[in-house]
Amino acid sequence: MNGDKSVDSEVSAIDACDLKMVDPGKVAAVRRSLPGPEDVVELADVFSLLGEPGRLRLLMSLLEGGEMCVCDLAATTSMSESSVSHALRLLRAHRIVSVSRRGRMAYYSLDDGHVRMLLNLGLTHTGHSRTTPVASPDTAVQGR
């Protein structure tokens, strides 16, 4: 356990300021540019919806397959139709998926290009993080 404590203290040292000094101009500019509290809550809701593996499998299926019905989504994700329907209701309520009806069939798709972009970026990030060593903060700044 002693090894764990030294790692924790090293991480804490990295995340702390050596010199306690605030840049008021930068703090004010960043605060002005931050989204409002309602927007932050809505974004957190979207990310929490994306954080559940079943819903994420549904979204990845829609990303790959385009428009799909509940039956096809259930077969693709190995989820029950009831679970798929419940998840789609949540995703639709948050404008992550949309539905179009043709006769008695309902077809779901990703709501817009922003959702596609978010999923693609997430996939790129996770694929990148598996194949590329993590850069130190100094290296990341030099690479800009």
Image (tube, helix red, strand yellow):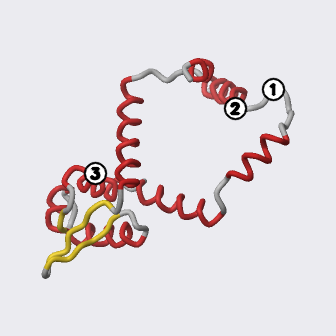
* Mark 3 vs 1, N-terminal side: 1
Amino acid type of the residue tagged 2 in the rendering: Asp
* Mark 3 vs 2, N-terminal side: 2
Which residue is under mark 3? Answer: 60
Q: CA distance from mark 3 to mark 1?
A: 43 Å
- Rendering coords of residue 131 (x, y %): 36, 24
Which residue is under mark 2? Answer: 15
Which residue is under mark 1? Answer: 18
Query: Tags 3 and 2 in contact by the CB under 8 Å rule?
Result: no
Amino acid type of the residue tagged 1 in the rendering: Asp
Q: CA distance from mark 3 to mark 2?
A: 34 Å
Identify the residue at image location x=27%, y=68%: 83
Q: Nearer the viewer, mark 3 or mark 2?
A: 3
Label 1: how many Cα within 10 Å (few below 14, some 14–19, many 20+): few
Looking at the image, residue 110 lies above or below residue 124: below
Compared across the picture, whether 69 is left or right of 9 comes to left
Q: Secondary structure at mark 3?
A: helix
- Rendering coords of residue 47 (x, y %): 47, 55
Q: Secondary structure at mark 2?
A: loop
Amino acid type of the residue tagged 3 in the rendering: Met
12 or 117, which is in the foreground? Answer: 117
